[in-house]
Amino acid sequence: MREQLRLMLADPTAEPALVGPRTAAIALILLERAADLDVLLIERATRDGDPWSGHMALPGGHAETTDADLGRTAERETLEEVGIDLSFAGERLGRLSDLTPVRGVPIAVRPYVYLLREPAPLLLSAEVRRALWVPIGPLQSGARRATHTFVRGGERMDFPAWDIDGSIVWGLTYRVLDELFRRFIGVSEPEPGALDNSRQSR
């Protein structure tokens, strides 16, 4: 799986600048277990003023001027939030498509994919309520498929999601994982009438 991931994410071109009023990076962290992969998801703590308060997410956050690049942003934020030093314990395999939420938050986000060499202990910050390793097989197969309804300005919008024992993964986090599945695992195209995941959310 490691070699397949390297090939899928290989990009010989120079990494372009991420353009936006604010920039951020997130880490999609994978751990190989037998014939499957687990992904690390976090549940953000409930905080006033945080537009993603209480949401299921991937570790990450805003870029700082001291970060050498956005990959370092993802690594620094991961260390701060869950205690994993990706520069030591993980291998940066590449990046996925840049994303821009449309939930009134002016920020551009770049996702990076990492593969851990072995399981790592987690040390959660006050920003993270909990963290869990989730097998990607049931997500990819549709076994945990769900729908998340979001209401804004009186408009009701339904988005594809996954239900992980009552915790809903949707929006930007869903889109990042969905791209990985489509590029690496080969998820088939949505059936006619299926929910449109191309709609930007969160």
Image: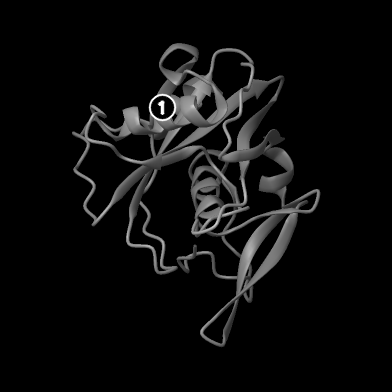
Residue at 20% in and 34% down: 13
Picture quadrant of residue 12: top left
Picture quadrant of residue 124: top right
Query: Where residue 184 appears, x then y in whole percent?
Result: 52, 38
Q: Is residue 45 above or below residue 148?
A: above
Query: Where residue 162 appears, x then y in whole percent?
Result: 69, 54
Q: Is residue 159 above or below residue 69?
A: below
Q: Is residue 196 above or below residue 51?
A: below
Residue at 44% in and 11% down: 88
Residue at 64% in and 16% down: 119
Report the front residue among 30 and 153. 153
Q: Is residue 28 left or right of residue 192?
A: left
Q: Quadrant of the N terminus?
A: top right
Q: Is residue 47 left or right of residue 36?
A: left
Q: Is residue 153 left or right of residue 21?
A: right
Residue lying at the far front of the rendered structure: 48
Q: Is residue 201 above or below residue 192?
A: above
Picture quadrant of residue 100: bottom left
What residue sits right under mark 1 in the picture? 75
Rate crowding at label 1 as few (under 14), some (14 to 19) or many (20 or more) other CA atoms within 10 Å: many
Residue at 65% in and 59% down: 161
Report the front residue among 46 and 188. 46
For badge 1, the amino acid type reads Glu
Residue lying at the far bottom of the rendered structure: 154
Residue lying at the far right of the rendered structure: 165
